[in-house]
Structures are given as structure tokens and as C-alpha cells.
Image (spheres, rainbow, N blue to C red):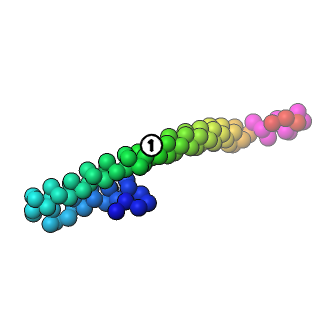
Amino acid sequence: MFAKSPTKNQKNFSDDCRGNKIYVEDGSLACLCWEKAAYGIVVAKEKGCTKASTESAKAVKKQKTACLKAFSKCKKAEDAAIALVHTCMAGEINMVAAKGEGRF
């Protein structure tokens, strides 16, 4: 019943219980459906799936944090580039070069 991914199968049971017209129209069948979904949760806990999913969520959060830091660094560089473009358009760099100072 829960060969590879108990939590995925449990999710399928839950989705089925919510969306299947048969369960909406028949209360007894709906109860049986939710009983299967609850059993799926028990099996997932017994097999350690909840621990694995928690570890996975932490790893994803760590990668997201690293990605946001990298994005922030790029965004700051982009913002600095806008100031440089504004400076160049004002002619300040060309004027410095024309004076022979040789720096930008």
C-alpha cells in the first residue's frame, strides 16, 4: 500500500477524500476515506517519513537562504551600476580622462 512514499500516498488519500464526488455525497464512504488517510499518517510516522521530510525542508531552507544572499549581493551591484551610469552620463568620467588624470 505504501511502498515508496507513504506521505505522497497519504496526500493522494486526502485529496481524494476532499475532491471525489462519491465521498461528498456519501458520509459513510467519506468516513472510510478519512480513516485510510489517517492510517497513512500513522504509517508515515512509523517509517520515519516525517523525520526525512523535516530534514529535507531544512536543507531546502538552507539553500534558499544561500540563494537569497547571492541575489542580494547581485542586486546591490546592480544598484551601484545605476549610479555609475548616471555619473557617466553627466560627463564626469570623460572630464577626468580629458584632464589626463587617468583615473575613473
Residue depicted at 15% across the width and 55% down the height: 31
9 versus 57 height, above or below? below
Secondary structure state at the residue bearing disc 1:
helix
Residue depicted at 44% across the width and 60% down the height: 4
Q: Quadrant of residue 94?
A: top right
Residue 48, how many percent across, how many down? 43, 46
Q: Nearer the viewer, residue 65 or 30?
A: 30
Residue 17, how many percent across, how many down? 21, 59
Q: Is residue 100 magenta?
A: yes
- Tell me if I can see residue 90 in this picture: no
Residues packed near mark 1 inside 10 Å, few (<14), some (14 to 19) or many (20 plus): few
Q: Which residue is mark 1?
A: 51
Quadrant location of the C terminus? top right
Q: Quadrant of residue 10?
A: bottom left
Residue furthest bottom in the image:
22
Residue furthest top in the image:
101
On screen, residue 58 versus residue 40, left or right, reads right
Residue depicted at 56% across the width and 43% down the height: 63
On screen, residue 75 versus residue 7, left or right, reads right
Which amino acid, mark 1?
Lys
Residue 35, how many percent across, how many down? 21, 53
Secondary structure character of the magenta stretch overall: helix
Residue 83, how many percent across, how many down? 65, 37
Residue furthest front in the image:
46
What's drawn in magenta, residue-wise?
A: 92-101
- Tell me if I can see residue 87 in this picture: yes
Quadrant location of the N terminus? bottom left
On screen, residue 27 versus residue 60, left or right, reads left
